[in-house]
Amino acid sequence: MNYIQYGKTGLKVSKFGLGCMRFPKDEKEAIEMVRYAIDNGVNYLDTAFVYQDSEIITGKAMRNGYRNKIYLATKSPIWNITKHEDFEKYLDQELMRLETDHIDVYLLHNMNPGNWEAVKKYDGFTFLDKMIEKGKIGHKGFSIHNSLTAFKEVVDSFDWEMAQIQLNILGETMQAGVEGLRYAANKGLAVVIMEPLMGGYLLNNVPAEVDELIRSHPEKRSLVEWCFRWLYNMPETSVILSGTSSLAQLRENLRIFDHATPNVMSGEDQEFIHKIRDAFEAKKSIGCTGCWYCMPCPHGVAIPEVFKLYNSYQLMNDPHDRLMYQSRIVPFGSGADQCLSCGICAQHCPQGLKIPELLKTVHEELSVLA
């Protein structure tokens, strides 16, 4: 495992960080996976208040001395904050869930416009400084799914120590993008990368054109390795999170990160990434990462499942996906036809997807009889 200096904090952390959002359903298996990661050199764990039972499972995994081997990052549920005192109330709940007396890196979660206004209104900045003084947190940061302009505003507003952004081979200029990565790093912030594989979207339905590119390339690397390699090639990248959901995935990631050093990609390698990107973008797929922030839908639409079927159909051109939608989704009242365009889902989408409009398109295309 390669280790790096975490911005100006003095922490020395593993280049690979374990994302704790997509644990296996079996708790015992999840705990074993976390401990396997730590036993093999991973010392950075990332979770959040909103990740279902993630904090509780992570807390159990850190028993028996494992807590002392890692740096723990978690996030404040800003959307629940209605007064300044709520910040510490939720932090205390997280400390109990995680069975620890301090959080090494504490993030204000997802600085979208609404959350950012709440942070300013209820003074999340003073809260972070107070918690450092109390010893409840070690370092202060934020995560964000927002525009580059908004990202720079947040970076410049406070003496943050880290920022967490989404970045992957399909999103070089999306949200904060590569420019945002460099902007924050140049100001001394550690920059943590989330969604490097778009929640598995990049791997679940690989176009035939991408498969052919990978097979014919003289350097025999998997798509997963190319995705990670593109990210760790950039020296501004501090930690790359991967939310593994099985031990096999974790082992593969650990193998890849054995060689995670910056400035390893040639000009030809970068051109290869552009070819992969072009092949994906030629398909009319939806950039849903399956995070489930849009759920539950008040009208019963199974939004992530519907988008997953649609993406599979667009990328693989398999008529079975249409059949599944028509026979297993729509008859049970979970289809896109149930959408009444209330827009609640779009307000919570980290990707900024116009979900109601996309659902109309999905239903039109998947409802066509073969």
Image (cartoon, rainbow, N blue to C red):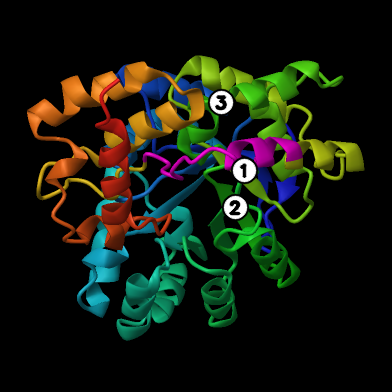
Residue type at mark 2?
Val
| Start-end of magenta stretch | 275-290
Q: Quadrant of the N terminus?
A: top right
The reply to whether callout 3 and callout 2 are in contact (CB within 8 Å) is no
Residue type at mark 1?
Ile
Residue at 16% in and 48% down: 297
Pick the front one: 220 or 215: 215
Q: CA distance from mark 1 to mark 3?
A: 22 Å
**Relative to 219, is 199 on the left or the right?**
left
> What is the x, y in percent for residue 92?
27, 58
Residue at 12% in and 44% down: 338
Residue type at mark 3?
Val
- Residue ID for mark 2: 192
Residue at 38% in and 74% down: 113
What's the mark number on residue 206? 3
Q: CA distance from mark 3 to mark 2?
A: 26 Å
